[in-house]
Image: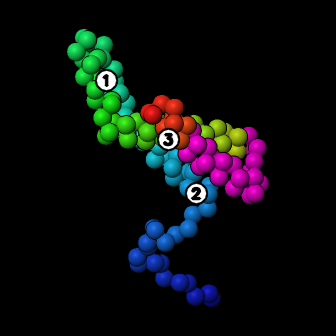
Amino acid sequence: MSVRKPAPRFLNLFLIKLPPSGVVSIAHRISGVLMFVSIPVIAYLFALSLESRQGFEQVRVWLASPAAIVLTVLLVWSFSHHLLAGVRHLLLDIEIGVQRAQARTSAWLVNLGALLLTAIYLAVGVL
């Protein structure tokens, strides 16, 4: 009979080194939640901007604030990462890139691609 190790009593998540595909998977879920939670805020701002000229000006001023810019950049990352990771998952579903080396490469491409698209937005959209 083999001796079983006891289950860890304290699991420090910051000490676990995830593979790139694990990072993509967790970030895909986080980005989906961020986009879902942002829907009411975006709908409210859109409705307010269509109400009147003053409402439009309120939305424009609010979107120019530093907090809104940070949230917008976060949403751009969220959308771009979710889109790229979703395409990666669809390709994996049809067995394209399922080999370990290819899966690691595609995971790195998703992570870097999302950051690159966010940097492009920062360079073009915000500044």
Q: Is residue 57 left or right of residue 111?
A: left
- C-alpha gap between disc 3 and disc 2: 18 Å
First to last magenta residue range: 93-117
| Label 1 crowd bin: few (<14), some (14–19), many (20+), radius 10 Å | few
Q: Is residue 110 left or right of residue 46?
A: right
Residue 80 seen from this side: no
Name the main secondary structure of what is drawn in magenta. Answer: helix
Percent position of residue 5, x then y: 53, 84
Residue 120 seen from this side: yes
Marks 2 and 1: CB-CB under 8 Å? no
- Residue at (58%, 57%) from the top-left corner? 22
Q: Secondary structure at mark 2?
A: helix
- Per the image, the residue denoted by label 2 is 22
| Label 2 crowd bin: few (<14), some (14–19), many (20+), radius 10 Å | few
Q: Is residue 78 left or right of residue 89?
A: left
In primary-sequence order, the first of circles 3 and 1 is: 1
Quarter in which the C terminus is drawn:
top left
- C-alpha gap between disc 2 and disc 1: 38 Å
In primary-sequence order, the first of circles 2 and 1 is: 2
Check residue 60 in the rendering and tell me which mark sits there, or answer none.
1
Q: Nearer the viewer, mark 3 or mark 2?
A: 3
Picture quadrant of residue 4: bottom right
Looking at the image, residue 22 lies above or below residue 11: above
- C-alpha gap between disc 3 and disc 1: 21 Å
Q: Amino acid at mark 2?
A: Gly
